[in-house]
Amino acid sequence: MACRFEVTLPFQDETGVLVATEALDQIDLLEDQLSVFRESSEISHINRNAATAPFGVTPSLFNLLALCKRLHRATEGAFDITAGPLTRCWGFLKREGRMPSETEIESARRLADSSLLVLDEQNQTVSFSKDAMEINLGSIGKGYALERVAARLRARRTIALLSAGASSIVAIGEGDRHQGWSVGLRHPRDKSKRLVTLRLKDCALSTSGSEEQFFEVAGQRYGHIIDPRSGWPAREVTSVSVITSSGAVSDALATAFFVGGRKLTERYCAAHRDVMAIMLESESENPLVIGNHPGARIESVA
């Protein structure tokens, strides 16, 4: 998943280190299952075989793929795990951005549609409706991995703050002194500043932005987050952070809201309780706060 996973524990917790170490061992197992960069992973096997015949998968992966399909519908297609051909087309799969032709974009866009991903619940199989389709869980994998680790720690009643790089966080419990875990969101345009500081209790936070991966052509900037509906990089938003009760859902929605912008975010949050988004639009200097979550409290705004 190309990031560092960490577990932060209250100072007085003497047993948490062993529990956290065991939990983090899960990450390697999940990487083996979910990564498109490992030929032996379950996802790689699906990508090689699901276009020719239904491919049987483990129950946990089937449930994750079913969640992805539901989120695709709920976000009006802005979240799509079948957008891998578009990421590859633009060169971002190997972090080598390039300007594709209109023909390349259109060919890849025709393959990016989760409605073409067929899940058979009775037989627990996955199949593709078109050749050359592929699944990439990069937009939900880190949050999902943290969620799985969090479930293990909660079962042991361990209080902790879990993080995957700078983009995904799961807060378990209220942190030290029961005031909530203090978390700062880095300003996407000035790394020396914080955009927002929050207190988190029993919730997940994920952030999407294109400030790290992009390229420029003729003075035009192209970021790595592609709108699967148009085939072009999303441009309305500089960064968006989403707080929900689920690490997987917050990760997916951060991508969807970045792609869909303010209007989609407002529609989704109005229809779904306990979803909070902190969005910095491309032409704005001040972040928007849309929706709310009982486990999140904003302490300061840049």
Image (cartoon, helix red, strand yellow):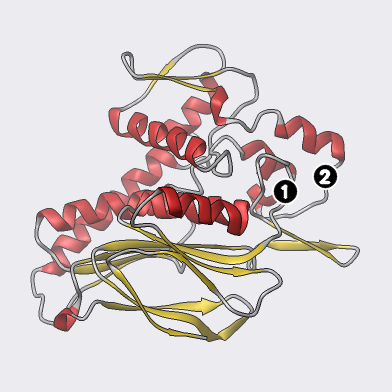
Q: State the mark number for residue 51.
A: none
Q: Amino acid at mark 2?
A: Pro
Q: CA distance from mark 1 to mark 2?
A: 8 Å
Left or right of 173 in this view: 163: right
Residue ranking furthest to the top: 53
- Please rate how many residues cluster around mark 2, counting C-alpha atoms within 10 Å: few if below 14, some from 14 to 19, many from 20: some
Of circles 1 and 2, the one toward us is 2
- Closer to the chain start, of discs 1 and 2, is 1
Q: Position of residue 157 (x, y in %)?
A: 9, 61
Q: State the mark number for residue 91.
A: 1
The residue under the point 29% across, 62% down is 203
Q: Position of residue 209 (x, y in %)?
A: 59, 64
Residues 279 and 144: in front is 279
Residues 127 and 184: in front is 184
Q: Position of residue 158 (x, y in %)?
A: 13, 64
Q: Which residue is mark 2?
A: 100
Instruction: Examine the rendering and report whether any part of residue 255 can be seen.
Output: no
The residue under the point 39% across, 36% down is 67
Tag 1–tag 2 contact (CB < 8 Å): yes
Q: Secondary structure at mark 1?
A: loop
Q: Amino acid at mark 1?
A: Gly
